[in-house]
Amino acid sequence: MDRSLAIFVISDDLYFPLFQRHCGSCIADEHYLPTLVSVRFPRRSANRSLTWVDWSKGGPHPARFGRKEVTVELLEGMRNGSSSSSSTCNYNGRSTRVCFLFARKFLPGSLSRLLRFAPRIMGFKQRFNYRAVIEQ
């Protein structure tokens, strides 16, 4: 979001009140912002998600990942778009190696494995001292 779009959003006195009135259970960053940009500025939308989410289980919430589910293969699939996601890894009509910048939903117990696998997945040269982070 650039400055001019941000100014439009914070100045909006037409769409946001309608959104509040007719979509009480909606979440502003998940529903209002994408809808507003799509309606008012469709050419300024990349029309893609930066967040990897697994909806394959069905229901109102995405799948959750605990310690045992967090594997190198899962994380590589999330990063490269080859897991249960249907991403094509395109951005503005061009292919990209990085499909997503974020992922959800990881349970608290999965942190140590996420931090342990990060160097391999992200291409860091040295192991990350995840124990120091957890003990803080």
Image (tube, grey):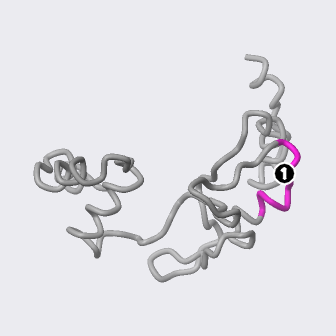
Q: Is residue 69 left or right of residue 19?
A: right
Q: Decide if residue 50 is on the left or right side of residue 28.
A: right
Task: Name the residue tied to disc 1.
Answer: 69
Q: Is residue 38 magenta?
A: no
Quadrant in which residue 51 is drawn: bottom right
**Outermost residue toward the bottom?**
93
**Which residue sits at x=21%, y=49%?**
21
Rendered image quadrant of residue 33: bottom left
Which is the main secondary structure of the residues drawn in magenta? helix
Residue under the point 85% across and 40% down: 127
User: Number of labelled discs?
Assistant: 1
Pinpoint residue 98: horizontal percent, then vertical percent.
Answer: 63, 66
In the image, the segment drawn in magenta is 67-76
Residue depicted at x 70% and y 68%: 80
Name of the residue lying farthest toward the top: 136
Q: Position of residue 96 (x, y in %)?
A: 60, 74
Q: Amino acid at mark 1?
A: Glu
Quadrant (top left, top right, bottom left, bottom right) of the N terminus:
bottom left
For image coordinates 66% across by 47% down, the residue present is 105
Q: Position of residue 46 (x, y in %)?
A: 40, 70
Q: Residues within 10 Å of mark 1 (few under 14, many from 20)?
A: some
